[in-house]
Amino acid sequence: MGRRRSGLALAAGGVAGVLALSGTVAAQSENRELIDGLEAQLLYVALPLTLFVLMILVYAAVKFHDNDDPKPTAEDPALEITWTAATAIILLFVGIAGYSVLVSPYVSPSQPGDLTGDGDIVDDEIESLEDLPETDDEEVVVRGYQWGWEATHSEHNVTTRDEIVIPADEDVTLWLTADEVIHALFIPELGIKQDAFPSEFTRVRTVAYETGLYDAVCTEFCGAGHSRMDADVVVVDPEVYDEWLEDNEGERATAPDPS
């Protein structure tokens, strides 16, 4: 009896822990909100199904554990049709929920070839970055190299090293590229993860909700200095961002204080 109670308490604690992890903290960006929302939807479907299957398993183990003369289960067409239809409905729900997130312009933004209609843009064609397609977003070019990150606000010719400054509550496009090898920019709190390829540009879009300092790291093994290839993403108020660009035009700058 004591073991059974301990098992039930452990199961209840596990369920409570999963529910607690389903997300009570507000998302920091549109990307993260979409991803967290999808995870919550899938969790609310998966958790009841898991508990239902476990209950059936426990029931069968208890009821038939000492059955010395087992009999085959009788055919039940209605039951088979029911669980087949239920499985199809669940898979349809998962597919629609996943597709609605994947088609978001923040999760799967249009890439250079889609915006220009002439395929991928290579480094030889954009020595001045002027051939990048124009968007309505605030744009920052982020270059990965061994072993660091350089962010360029080409419109004002402002460059930062290992700091990526973006405005809050505005659409932002990060154009990612790399020098020698493939890098990958990962900003967990903003829900951003994208590879950066040598001589090519890939696009990341986001809207950051809260000002502050966010960690960014490289998640593509890129050599001996990979472990120290990190950066700060500095999200500031739009007014502070515009003032910072004007004050540092044409210079290599340091990020403003996000507070």
Image (cartoon, rainbow, N blue to C red):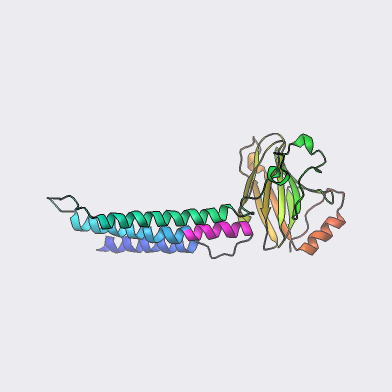
Is 191 left or right of 59, judged from the image as shown?
right
Instruction: Give the extent of the magenta segment.
Output: 29-41
Closer to the camera, 19 or 129? Answer: 129
Q: Judge by depth and name the residue closer to the eye, 50 or 14.
A: 50
Q: Residue at x 39, y 54 (%)?
A: 88
Relative to 55, say whether 185 is above or below.
above
Drawn side of residue 137 relative to residue 14, left or right: right
Quadrant into which the C terminus falls? bottom right
Residue 227 position, x and y percent, is 63, 42
Question: How many numbered tags mark residues here?
Answer: 0
Q: Quadrant of the N terminus?
A: bottom left
Helix, strand or loop: magenta stretch: helix
Viewer-proximal residue, 168 or 49?
Answer: 49
Q: Position of residue 90 (x, y in %)?
A: 41, 56
- Which x, y percent locates residue 253? 82, 51
Q: Residue at x 81, y 38 (%)?
A: 127
Asked whether, in this view, residue 143 is left or right of residue 89, the answer is right
In magenta segment, residue 257: no
Q: Is residue 37 above or below residue 251?
A: below
Q: Quadrant location of residue 220?
A: top right
Judging depth in this view, the residue of 35 and 162 nearest the camera is: 35
Residue 39 magenta-highlighted: yes
Specify whether 249 is left or right of 71.
Answer: right
The answer to which quarter of the image holds residue 52 is bottom left
In x, y percent, where is residue 44? 44, 62
